[in-house]
Each structure stands twice: as structure tokens, then as C-alpha cells.
Amino acid sequence: MYPKVKPALARAWRDLQTVQFGVTPAHAVVLGPVDTATGSLIDRVDGTRGMELLRAEARAMGLAEGRLDELVRRLAAAGLLDDVTAGGPRAQAVRRRPEVLERLGPDLGSLSLVHRDPGGDLRGLAARRAIRVQVRGSGRVGAVVAAVLAGAGVGRVEVLDGGRVTGADVAPGGLGPASVGRLRAEAAAALVRESAPGRAPRAGDPDGPGPAPPALVVVAPRDGLQAWAPDPATAADWVAAGTPHLYAGVLEGTGLVGPLVLPGGTACAGCMERDRVDRDPAWPRMLVQWRSAHRRRATAACDLGLSTAVAGLAASHALAFLDGELPASTAARWEAALPGLHWERVPLRPHPDCPCAAAAPAVGAGAVRS
């Protein structure tokens, strides 16, 4: 074991016997009592020394026998300890890729706060590299989401879209001006390759993705209406296969992230459509007209700042889910409209008549809002 105090949390003495690790309340930890000598010993727990050498240094500092082991136990119990040798075979495979570690250093620091056990950061990164994600759409939202997921270490990011890139698709962090005129699928695939830290893992690599179906589908259509009012027929295969999917987009100056649909557990596109029809019988008639108008419209209203914020939030929610947590978009949609941009959570409920059967466990409560 080569123990290491997690460097992601800034350290400060609250008083002569208490150390606080971390600034923000979400992850800050207070440790005490800690005397000055033990505080100096903490500085040496930096991953460059094994336990035997640390014990020898503790003795040289005049600390009692067993003080080092006690300190390591306390740090581990508080979620403050890492181990540069931990994580298992897949983590070791990542350690052999220095270009990946250099690019993803900040991400590893963040993962170390979420995965509190020693080696949890590299285990989390190794898990990401073994994951396959599909992004539906390569516009101002979808392309940026794909780039962020690839850049954050997701092993295989596929982007599905048709047609050719137009100037309206270009966005910082997404498709660049040189992509205009190229097939959208080809341009997005190139963006994913450029965004990935080093060579993307292949199926045969020890840390590469397997042949399993996507762990997540991110639905980020260039037509924001398809994210606001998703077509149940399009989502039917994902619901039948049990594939989680997350909606994101911008429609008429309103950005939306969610819902994250867990088939059979939370409201799906069919639930949302049925609920809207229950509350507004004119909804199907209007939806047909809106969809027809969007097909004829050359350029939709999509503020660049808002689309970038939506893409970033959607990518963060996707990564949280891929890392094993349920983000706030589960069974809910987050909305923010120009010019105020106040993010509002709209809970979504399963519909009892939807064949997805999510209403039986009734995960998530509240009403859908159109």
C-alpha cells in the first residue's frame, strides 16, 4: 500500500487541533484532534512512500509506535485516503497510459470525491472506459455532449445523425467551421476522436468496452421539439430493451435537460404524451402542426450560451449516471428560459395506461407540465 491523502480537497487548520479538508460543504471533512506532529506526518502521506517507510519516518519524528497506522485508518474512514496501487486490473491498465492520466487529472480528482474508497478514482475512470454511449444528434447540444463524454474518458461514444453539417451546427466545443459540408456522422466521429484523451480503448483492450448495448442513449436532437415532446415510437426500442435514455435540447429560448428515463421505472415518452393529452385534448392536433412546421423551418431558435449550458449539464447528468448515481434529471425535466435562466425542476410521473408499465412501481411523483 502506498497511501495518499486525496489532493482534490484543500486543507486548512480550523484551530490548533482540528484540520478541515475541503472548502465547499458538499465534500468537506473535519478531522480532529490532530496535533502538530501528526499534521506534519499527514504531509508525508503523498503516495511516494509505502507503509514501512512511513512508519520509520513517524518514529524519526518522535511519534509513538502505531501512530501512523492509526492515522491511515482515520483518514480512510473519513474518505480522505487514496492508494496509488489500488483499483484492480483495469485501473492498472489505465495507469499504464500516462497520456490519459495527464489529460484526466482533474476528472480523477473529482472522481476521488465521489468514490471515497482508496483507488476509487481510477476504478471509476476504468469503468467509464469500458462503457458505450450513444448520442442521437450532432447539433449545438448533441455534438458538445459527445465531445464532453469522450473527453471525460467514456470509452466508446457513438453519434448518430443524418445530413450534412451547416453553419448553424457550429459551436465552440462542438463541430467547428471546417466541418461545414461534411456528413454529420463523420464530422461528429472525428470530433469524438479529437476529444478523447489519447487513443480510445478498443474492444480487445483490458480496459476497453465490450460488445454490450449502450449503457445510455443521450437524445439531443437538432430539432428541440423532439426533446420537448419526444416521439414514443422513436423511444419504443429503448424502452423494450431496457436502455436508459436522457433527453436534452433547446426549444424557442428554453433549455431542457431530462428526463433520464429508466425503462419500467420512470416516465417515458409515451407517459409524457398520454399525460399531455389527458390535460389538453388539442395537444395531438397541435403537435402534428408543430412537427410539420419544424421540418420546413431552416433554422430554429437556439441561443449559443443556453445550448452550451444545456450540453454541459446534460453531459454532467450522463456522467453521474454512468458513474453509478441517479442524477436530478431522473424522472424529472430541468428547464431554463431566456432571459432569466432560472432552472426549474418539473417532476414527471408514469402514466397508468402506458405499456411501459412504469406506473406500477410509481418511481417519481408529480405532474408533467407542457
Image: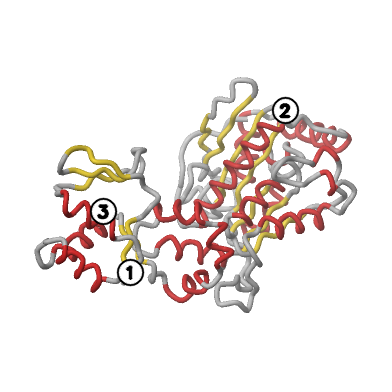
Q: Nearer the viewer, mark 3 or mark 1?
A: 1
Q: From the viewer's perspective, is residue 131 above or below residue 29? A: below
Which residue is most to the front? Answer: 60
* Residue identified by numbered label 3: 78
Q: Which residue is mark 1?
A: 2
Kindly report which numbered mark, 1 or 2, lies closer to the viewer in this rendering: 1
Q: Which residue is mark 2?
A: 252
Q: At 30% from the left edge and 54% from the top edge, which residue is drawn?
A: 80
Kind of element beneath mark 3: loop
**Amino acid, disc 3:** Ala
Q: Nearer the viewer, residue 220 or 85?
A: 85
Q: Residue at x 82, y 37 (%)?
A: 168
Q: Residue at x 57, y 41 (%)?
A: 313
Secondary structure found at label 1:
loop
Q: Amino acid at mark 1?
A: Tyr
How dense is the environment of label 2, judged by Cα within 10 Å: few (below 14), some, or many (20 and up)?
few
Marks 1/2: CA–CA distance:
54 Å
- The answer to whether residue 364 is left or right of residue 353 is left
Residue 31's spot in the image, x, y percent? 21, 47
